[in-house]
Image (cartoon, rainbow, N blue to C red):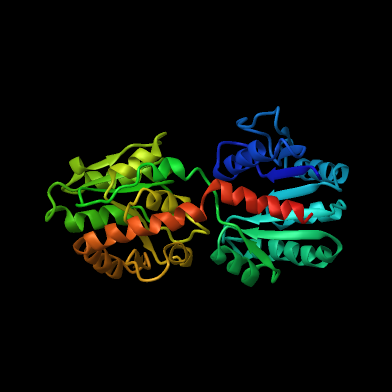
Amino acid sequence: MKPVHYVMWQIGPGGLELVVKQYSEYFYQHRKLYAYGLRPNWYQIYDESKVEVAAGDSGKLRPYWQYYRYCRKYRHDIFHLQSVGPLILLLHLLAGGKNVIYHIHGTIYWKSALQKIYLGAGWRWVKRLLPKVKATFVANSKYSASIFREKVLPVPTEVIYNGFDVQKFAAKKHLRTSVKRIGYAGRLWEGKNTELLIRLFEEVADQHPELELHFAGEGPLKEALEQQAQATRFADRIFFHGYLKDIPSFYASLDIFLFLSAHESFGNVIAEALLTGLPTLTSDVPVFEEIFGQGNGFVLGNPQQYDLIKKNFLKAIDNFPHLAQAALEISDSIETQCSIENHLKQIEKVYEKH
């Protein structure tokens, strides 16, 4: 079997890096494995008895030259690139790489007109070279696949949903019977619209004196959110827990989960919350409807239209028993769809094609 090289921007305890850790623990008995960080490692998370770890140096150009040489050395192996962008993929192709898997984990490909120019040019060069190699594009949702084909490259794309240890969440599954704790888990940063959670909490806090709002996670907006909470009349009922190790128990303690992100390619926290049977209310990002299916009443609308979000949120509170039952019913399909075992078997099939 061909060796596999997992390529990331930097090796550390992030989402993509932890997925690669799961790959290494599953595939190491059958294949030689490598993990490569384009930038210096800032945290070592891999068992080097299972995967050989390497990284580039700091600097503007040197890491790219080092990666080109690395690709050249191992050009006959399989390279599994983790959303590293067109320039890294182009370097791989220019170095003579024969087998490449490009894993799409997001939906944002440029943030400015300038980036669109040079990154778009990179993708066009990639398109010219692709016919010379065996390449597979894998996306973590139908939505992220459609955005990639529309904005970047019109190529066939396989959809393999994110996988994780579903059992530790499913073990906490239960039917909610009343609304006492609303919560959020994830990064506290721009685009997640976490400030709207406090506004929505204010809309119902008077009518529900036992209701609390709980945040789990860290991020640059934490201080601003704490100040926003203090400015309300309900500061003593809004809690910031920071990073929590036992996130399944946090979900289990909640009655409603709110996640109003402006953009997501999948949204692991949505799946995690639903696995515990937790009614989960979201923005109208298409991938959330893909996860939920139709007609469950979980989608509140566009975060930029607060009046619509508020209207649907209040309706959800009034319709809570239905939402709780719907969340419990959908959890079984999420368990199958997102199991790490299912994910790894699908990735293995991709490797076998190379």
Relative depth, front residue between 28 and 131: 28
Relative depth, front residue between 4 and 1: 1
Viewed as shown, does residue 144 lie left or right of 296?
Answer: right
Relative depth, front residue between 157 and 258: 157
Viewed as shown, does residue 186 lie left or right of 197?
Answer: right
Relative depth, front residue between 232 and 331: 331
Quadrant where the N terminus sits is: top right
Whole-percent x, y for residue 6 in the image = 71, 44
Judge whether residue 192 can be spotted in this image. no
Residue 298 position by quadrant: bottom left
Viewed as shown, does residue 39 lie left or right of 70?
Answer: left
The residue at the point 66 percent across, 55 percent down is: 103
Look at the picture and state if 245 lies above or below 188: above
Look at the picture and state if 333 lies above or below 23: below
Whole-percent x, y for residue 82 in the image = 66, 50
The residue at the point 51 percent across, 52 percent down is: 338
The residue at the point 60 percent across, 57 percent down is: 160
Judge whether residue 121 can be spotted in this image. yes
The residue at the point 22 percent across, 59 percent down is: 321
